[in-house]
Image (cartoon, rainbow, N blue to C red):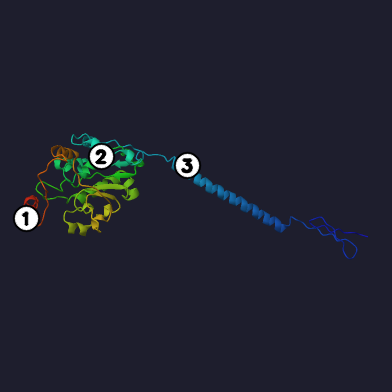
């Protein structure tokens, strides 16, 4: 009698009813299974290639960013010009009184643009420019260029200071404020810095600082109704303005990132005043008023009102 064996994948045998054995072969590596195995292998291989490519991309990006090649423009350390040296060495400039220490600002770095003298130091030919009530723009410029927070490498700067003097003629001897040149002068300075270095265009001016130390600040006009109508110039809308003007209510001249700073009083004047009239000394003046009350509009200097209106309206 012939016997046939039934061989399954476990190697077991089972008899048939006819008394014989039936041989059944089960091939594990069938064509279909082999095809699925090939697909699985290709999938795993592709997945590993994909992960390797992604990791290689990020690694190369990190290396390129970390070791970015420098150009003559990108890493130039700018040396101060003669007009900046003269500004620091000015006898009227008390560096000890206005020096900015880096310890107060935890590593803050400010790059001060070295602008042509027509934007700043040329205006110092008028002595009032650096000593009157609106001289904060000069004092802040001097404090920054001699302070520890200043950096000569613009690429490591946190902020950029644009030293444009626009308030020098705001309070003139004859009483007529002159600030009509402010917008065009600042616009010209912005064109200059944006053509020389990439930082203005990089941030659209959001990390650039200007000073507007006069009435109605960043609106740059002496009459409030005109200042409110004109508003902040478009080219300054993204920048930071240090201004002496500030009110609690909403005002068009404050619709910009602004920091209210006090009017300027020179340290020398404070020391002289305290030397002549000590705080605890006897005083013979009750109050002093030098405002401009619109009783006699033709007297634009206001000096008449300091003597006449105070006596007639307040005493």
Instruction: Indicate the position of residue 31 as horizontal and vertical percent values.
Output: 72, 57
Disc 2: CA contacts within 10 A as few (<14), some (14-19) or many (>=20): many
**Viewer-side label of 3, 2:** 2
Say which label, 1 or 3, has the lower sequence index: 3
Label 3 SS: helix
- Mark 1 touching mark 3, by CB under 8 A? no
Identify the residue under disc 3.
Answer: 63
> Can residue 299 be seen here?
no
**Viewer-side label of 1, 3:** 1
Identify the residue under disc 2.
Answer: 143
Disc 1: CA contacts within 10 A as few (<14), some (14-19) or many (>=20): few
Say which label, 3 or 2, has the lower sequence index: 3
Taking the image as shown, residue 144 lies to the left or right of residue 65, namely: left
Residue at image x 7%, y 50%? Answer: 307
Disc 3: CA contacts within 10 A as few (<14), some (14-19) or many (>=20): few
The answer to which of 53 and 240 lies nearer the viewer is 240
On-image quarter of the C terminus: bottom left
Label 1 SS: helix
Tell me: residue 91, above or below residue 223.
above
**Viewer-side label of 2, 1:** 1
Instruction: Indicate the position of residue 44 as horizontal and vertical percent values.
Output: 62, 51
Identify the residue under disc 1.
Answer: 312
Residue at image x 21%, y 58%? Answer: 228
Q: Quadrant of residue 165?
A: top left
- Real-space Cα separation, disc 2 to disc 1, in angstroms: 43 Å
Taking the image as shown, residue 127 lies to the left or right of residue 145, namely: left
Label 2 SS: helix
Residue at image x 50%, y 47%? Answer: 57
Instruction: Indicate the position of residue 235 as horizontal and vertical percent values.
Output: 27, 53
Say which label, 2 or 1, has the lower sequence index: 2
């Amino acid at each position: 009698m012939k016997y046939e064996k039934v061989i399954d994948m476990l190697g077991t045998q089972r008899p048939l009813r006819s008394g014989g054995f039936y041989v059944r072969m089960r091939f594990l590596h069938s064509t279909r299974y082999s095809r699925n195995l090939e697909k699985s292998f290709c999938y795993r291989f592709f997945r590993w290639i994909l992960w390797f490519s992604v990791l290689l991309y990020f690694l190369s990006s990190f290396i390129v960013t970390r070791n970015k090649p420098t150009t003559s423009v990108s890493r130039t350390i700018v040396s101060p010009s003669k007009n900046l040296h003269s500004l620091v060495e000015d006898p009227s400039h008390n560096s000890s009184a206005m020096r900015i220490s880096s310890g107060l600002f935890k590593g803050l770095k400010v790059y001060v643009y070295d602008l042509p003298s027509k934007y700043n130091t040329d205006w110092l030919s008028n002595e009032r420019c650096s000593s009157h009530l609106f001289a904060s723009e000069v004092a802040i410029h001097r404090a920054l260029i001699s302070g520890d927070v200043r950096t000569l490498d613009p690429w490591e700067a946190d902020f950029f200071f644009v030293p444009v003097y626009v308030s020098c003629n705001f309070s003139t001897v004859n009483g007529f404020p002159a600030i009509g040149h402010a917008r065009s002068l600042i616009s010209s300075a912005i064109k200059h810095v944006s053509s020389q270095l990439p930082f203005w265009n990089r941030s659209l001016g959001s990390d650039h600082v200007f000073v507007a130390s006069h009435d109605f600040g960043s609106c740059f006009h002496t009459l409030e109704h005109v200042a409110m109508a004109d508003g902040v110039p478009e080219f300054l809308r993204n920048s930071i303005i240090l201004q002496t003007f500030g009110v609690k209510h909403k005002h068009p001249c404050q619709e910009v990132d602004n920091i209210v700073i006090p009017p300027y009083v020179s340290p020398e004047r404070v020391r002289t005043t305290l030397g002549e009239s000590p705080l605890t000394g006897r005083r013979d003046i009750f109050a002093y008023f030098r405002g401009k009350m619109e009783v006699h509009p033709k007297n634009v200097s206001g000096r008449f009102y300091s003597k006449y209106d105070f006596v007639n309206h307040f005493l």
